[in-house]
Amino acid sequence: MFSRTENFKQYTSYYPVVSTLIAVNLILYVLTLLPVIGELLWNYGIQVNFLIQSGEWWRIFSAMFLHANFMHVLFNMFSLFLFGPELEKIAGKARFITIYLLSGIVGNMATFMLNDSSYASLGASGAIFGIFGAFGALVYYTRRTMPMLRKLILPIIVISVIMTFLQSNVNVYAHLGGLVTGFLLGLIYLHPTRILSWRKQRMAGK
């Protein structure tokens, strides 16, 4: 399910939303390394709570597309590369981008509301956890018909949540806010008829 065997052209053709998100994040990361442009992106893009309090609300959105270092962007984009395509296929392009963006936004709003005014953060982790949450909803709907799916996905979700609390410099509220948002949207979007269509496609090898 999460084994990617497509070549570059196939991947970008089959999963245009995931491909675009990965490209945007990587391009912006490269831009942050450049003089002047990088400083502007950092100064006006990352989430800083006291600046949001002063009216710079766009930071709740823009921070989703900026990363602190190479390993940060690599881990998040690899997770998107691996887990995003199947959800884009199941949910459809519009629903997938809604899950991704709203999960990231809600996670950053939770960060703003539950941390002090000096707190600063950035990264796509909240949106990535939204994907995990949507898969959690998929597990809920298929718990009787596809038990192997539960055995595959639940450990990923559980391990990701545990690592959230064990690692340092992790935005816990963004992770949990994204996870819950993705799960709730998944309950709405991944209704049984859509799952049935996805299962037929998988059986047909499409």
Image (tube, helix red, strand yellow):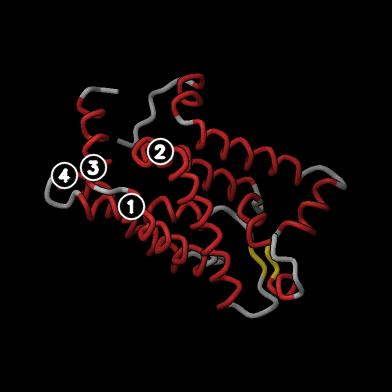
- Quadrant location, the N terminus: top left
The residue beneath circle 3 is: 193
Q: Residue at x 82, y 52 (%)?
A: 40
Mark identifier at residue 156: 1
Inter-mark Cα distance, 4 to 1? 17 Å
Inter-mark Cα distance, 3 to 1? 25 Å
The residue beneath circle 2 is: 92
Looking at the rendered image, the disc whose residue lies closer to the viewer, 3 or 1, is: 3
Assign a secondary structure to mark 3: helix
- Mark earlier in primary sequence (4, 3): 4
The residue beneath circle 4 is: 146
Image quadrant where residue 89 sits? top left
Q: Residue at x 69, y 65 (%)?
A: 57
Horizontal and vertical percent position of residue 74: 56, 43
Assign a secondary structure to mark 2: loop
Q: Are marks 4 and 2 in contact (CB under 8 Å)?
A: no
Residue 79 visible at all = no
